[in-house]
Image: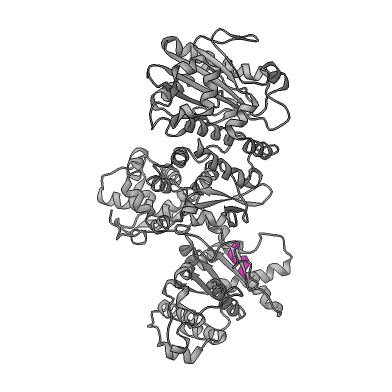
Amino acid sequence: MSSELEPETVYDMVLVDRENDVRVVTKQLFRLYTLRKLGRPFKPVIPFGPHLFGSGKTKFVKSYLELVNNMGESALIGLDYVCESEKANRRGFLEKLKRASLLYVDLRGLKPTVPIELFRNLEWALYFRMIEACCTSVGQEPEDEEVVFKECRTRPYKLVRKLRSILNIPSDQYLLVAFDEVGVFDTKATFFELEKNDKGVVRPYNDFIGIISQLCEEPDLFFIVVGKSEGLNIYNYVASVSRVQLVFIPLAPLEKHSIVEHLEKSSSFLFTGSPKVSEILCHEDFSTSELAELLLELTGGVPGLLVRAINYLLLYKSSNNNFLLSKETFLIIMNSFLVTNYCVAPFLPRLISLSEQRKCLLRMLTLLSLYRIRFDFDETVQMSSNSDVFLFDLVTDMCLYRRLVIEPDRNERYEVLIPKLLIEYIDQGLKDDRLEWLLLQTLKSQSVDFFYESKCRILEGLIATLFYLHFSRRPTNSSMFSTLGQLSRVWNEMNLQFSSESAAYYMKSIHYTRAVLGTERMTFGSNDEWERIVEEMLELEKIYIPFHSTFHSPDILFKLHGRTNEKNLMIVGIACKGRWSRNGIRWNEILEDAHKFLKPVHDQVLTSHPTWHCMLIIMSTQLATNVSEDLNHSSRCYSSGDSVEDFVIPHNCELVILSEADVENFIGKDILSNLRNAFKSVDNPHSRNIGISTLQEIVLSLPEI
């Protein structure tokens, strides 16, 4: 791969799906305009994008005015109900904004400068950096520092006058200054003499924001600030200072339809006539929609990763002109170690420098991503006994992304997004962390909607993970292994475990058919679905979780081998009965699951394999009172030939019903209680319902197994 050929030199990237971000920024610029007109002291409003690489922040701020012109009045007017006079006011502002000049200032060029008496003065350095950027934008050589200082000094109105002079724009034309790479203050703060607070602490972003707040008092001048840093985050000390109000720009990842639009509108310089990317990479047997879906799965819609993936495909095509892309060739190319490292290269410095404390939180963020648990803008995570961090900022610090979700009540919440390209890289350094490795492999193997539609997905995923950790690492030390051994003579005699270290290397969703809401629970034996599932499971050693737990039985499926005799095999099904209301699981529901699992397995599989066995484990969060009493409030195993009401357990089969006490011991009493509370009223709770502390408790308890 030629790393010299960066995306901007390979194809013309058309910006798509940024209308919402344009509205957010335009609304805040209009607020600043309105506050100035009031003629009294005000807190300036600054649109703010604290994003890491890949969000498209630089492309967005550079293209903002073009996007405003393309959107017209929808950039500001018509979003909420306003009177006609207010509409006219907004329309006048918008017309002037369309004619504004943009000054893009890359703060990586910020450095101390002469005169010597102000050599370490941040305000003067920032002024001169703006003038440098201004000169560069019109093709001029930057003027001498001493000359500029004599003309402007550190007077806001003189600076603005100088900028307008260089740009050759009138005094009443809007000037929009976009500061990028604001994270330079993480490393360059020591270059300047900065203000100390009453504790002697230097906070460079307070100084930086203070300088901008003074400039905001100048008429017809506006600002956007973007760039990731350690010190400038969503809800930390900077956002709460009295000088300004920072308003977040979402810059959400792209959805499939937007990726299609990007492929159809962007063109490549590498090919004669600069054809569209979709024309280069797609053909009659491989549509743009198919390519967009694959790119979404790989990159999560993160613009930076998406652009680099497309860039690689274009370079590959240019050097292999007869090559035709397909789903199979796409996966072969993009799953290579070389491509992964190329696509994530801009992340590497930050990934390598992550603190151990933050790495420990990766499991929790993976759980959030895997189960699509939503969180609020201002939600916090406990880093240590005396330290909290905002979850929003933690996601960015960990080089991960957020997906913005607008809920039916119009509340904005977020989900953690871990693109599969990042999973490939992170996975390289996690071979000794079995739990994180399993979670990432599960996340990597699933489609975007996995775990999302079912009320009990979190319970099922947690139980499947627990079983894997119990039976692959130290099965003889496992409390659940011991419990099943005491209940079942067959289990004890077979001395079961996953067949190897790589067994059940990820959980896979079964979704051969999509059930229709309101239909009865499906019996696997009713068609050839069960045969396909068992055949694939027995061959590939995966833990299966059906796509719709509500309509299939069991909810989890895997196999275990005898430790001394590989021919001994136990097919294990787990029916997770998550009841979050007062009603417990009744006998008829237990027997329905037993009939739908044990009988077809016996008839279709066990009859031709005499050394194989099958076990169904009923794992309920709450049993009906009469069921608990019949079981004497203990776990029980029904073996071959036993009658349970009118159901007879088939040959080489067993039905295990775990008591509530054993389920609590297996999952954790506090964890189970928190899950019950979270799911009482909603099918898809966000993290405030489940509790970040619950997730932290889960990831802390699992490695102890």
Q: Is residue 697 magenta?
A: no
In the image, is residue 634 above or below residue 232? above
Q: Main secondary structure of the magenta part?
A: helix
Q: Position of residue 655 (x, y in %)?
A: 57, 16
Coloration mode: one colour
Which residues fall within the magenta stretch? 23-29
Q: Give the percent coordinates (x, y) of residue 505.
A: 42, 33
Q: Indicate whether residue 25 is drawn in magenta.
A: yes
Q: Is residue 245 above or below residue 150?
A: above
The part of the image, by quadrant, that contains residue 494 is: top left
Q: Identify the residue at horizontal 46%, vertical 16% (top origin).
A: 493
Rendered residue at 37%/83% (across/down): 141
Question: How many numbered marks have been drawn onto this rendered protein structure?
Answer: 0
User: Residue shown at 49%/48% (left/top)?
Assistant: 362
Residue at far top of view: 641
- Give the answer, above or below, for where 295 lies relative to 466: below
409 displayed left or right of 574: right
Query: Quick one: which residue is furthest to the front in this view?
Result: 477
Query: Who is closer to the viewer here, 579 or 671?
Result: 671
- Say above or below: 119 vs 394: below
Is 693 or 525 nearer to us in this picture? 693
Name the one closer to the observer, 383 or 414: 383
In percent of width and height, residue 85 lies at 73, 70
Residue 174: in sight, yes or no? no
Residue 516 percent across, percent down from the top left: 60, 28
> Residue 413: in sight, yes or no?
yes
